[in-house]
Amino acid sequence: MLVVYDGHELDDVYALLDELGARPVRARLSGPTRFRGWSRPPLLFVIPAAEALRIELPEAIALARSTRIAVADTSSEALLGRIARLGYDYLLRRPVHPDVVRLLLQRALYRGADARHDVRRPAGQRVGLRVGWRTLPATLVEFSAGGARVLVAADVAVRTDARLRLPRRLLGGRSASIACRVVRRRGDSAPGVVSLALRFDEAIEPRALANLSRVLAGRAVGPVLAPSASWIERWIERFRSWRGRAARAPGSRREPAVAAIEETPFEERRQLRRAALDREVVALDAEAHAAARVLVGRDLSLAGMRVDPEPDLRVGDALRIALYDPLGAPIELDARVVRDDGERGLALAFENLTSAAAGRLHGLVDELPDARSGAPTRAAGPGVERIDRAACERVVLGRVVEAPAAR
């Protein structure tokens, strides 16, 4: 997460990212530390709009499929058009309520590939994961341009640096070794198998990515097989098992606490270790749950609105949502999913609208441009613009207060 600014212009954005556990990197445009931290493609890139117009993005960021946000203190429509041409995803106009900024950052950070341009693809192919001196057999479960999920028959800690090795049969030529970091781990249903979420620290060559997509699209995706441990992994596990039995033997001089830990089932050990991790990992999981409830709304009217595709919502679901006025408190409304338009999103109809909520909603609708226009038709007020390559549109951010019951 890269926040670029001099002075104190984006201190609030940096503080919010730090509060969310994202561990942002502050980069400057002047002074001896200029451009430090720009070498690795970030998941999120935030910069003042005026600076975005003046600088040329480094290749690592220009080619990365990251979410790019420009922050402006003006409501100039000309600025919006220029920012759009530079490839930014959102223009955040001040003044804006801090909760709106928080929702936008949550959406950008934690919805992962679904919220960015990456498309996650099922895989089920054999690959390798190099951790230190070991290359672990792994099964590639999902991949996107920004990361992957693999299964390994070994215990790998969160925040471990690794390299994902893709064989030449998947890339149609040379093999590839991609630097990555373990950002999440979970025990799989198969005994001794761990599911690892990997974040790539470098961009995949576009030609290799296109070929990998084509190869996987042409293969039938069957059940994902748990990777088998290598002979050396099996030997290490047998040695650890022997040491555990020796510790539990009568008269053992091993500390009782050590023996107790070794007797703890795998799932409990995983949870105990996870609780001991630092704020980055704990916050990532907590905020991911919150971000799953963030809604990006379009075509807002007094009758309802359209939201981006949400896999957890279906036609007929009733929910309570909070829409965020850029300058005021959120507006809580009852809504129901009335139509699923696929990639265009879901249509929500508002229900049980009170007069007070209707009045505030009317004011919010007036702040947004005509939905029939590809660009704003009146002077835009403060808020958030989502930038599309073909058009720019004002969006309203909200969250789900009460979700449908789990199915």
Image: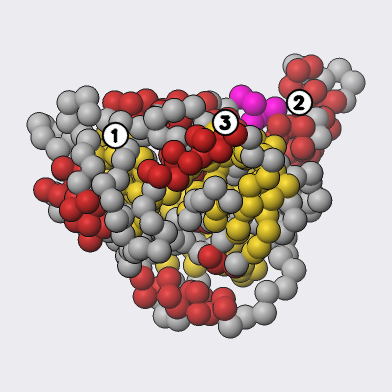
Q: Quadrant of residue 331?
A: top right
- Which residue occupies 57% across, 78% down? 217
Disc 2 and disc 3 in contact, CB within 8 angstroms: no
- Which residue occupies 52% across, 35% down? 359
- Which element carries disc 2, helix, strand or loop? helix
- The residue that label 2 is drawn on is 261
Q: Mark 2 or mark 3: which is in front? A: 3
Confirm whether the magenta stretch covers residue 37.
no
Which amino acid, by three-letter code, is at mark 3? Ala
Q: Position of residue 129 (x, y in %)?
A: 54, 56
Sooner in the amino-acid sequence: mark 2 or mark 1: 1
Disc 1 and disc 3 in contact, CB within 8 angstroms: no
Q: Residue 399: in sight, yes or no?
A: yes
Question: In the figure, 216 relative to 146: above or below?
Answer: below
Q: Which mark is residue 94?
A: 1
Per the rendered image, the range of residues in magenta is 272-276
Q: Mark 2 or mark 1: which is in front? A: 1
Disc 2 and disc 1 in contact, CB within 8 angstroms: no
Real-space CA distance between mark 2 and mark 1, rounded to the nearest whole angstrom: 53 Å
- The residue that label 3 is drawn on is 356
Q: Which mark is residue 381?
A: none
Q: Mark 1 or mark 3: which is in front? A: 3
Q: Residue 164: in sight, yes or no?
A: no
Q: How crowded is the residue under tag 3: few (<14 C-alpha within 10 Å), some, or many (20+)?
A: few
Which residue lies most toward the right here? 250
- Which residue occupies 53% across, 26% down? 278
Q: Main secondary structure of the magenta part?
A: helix
Question: In the figure, 359 relative to 80: above or below?
Answer: above
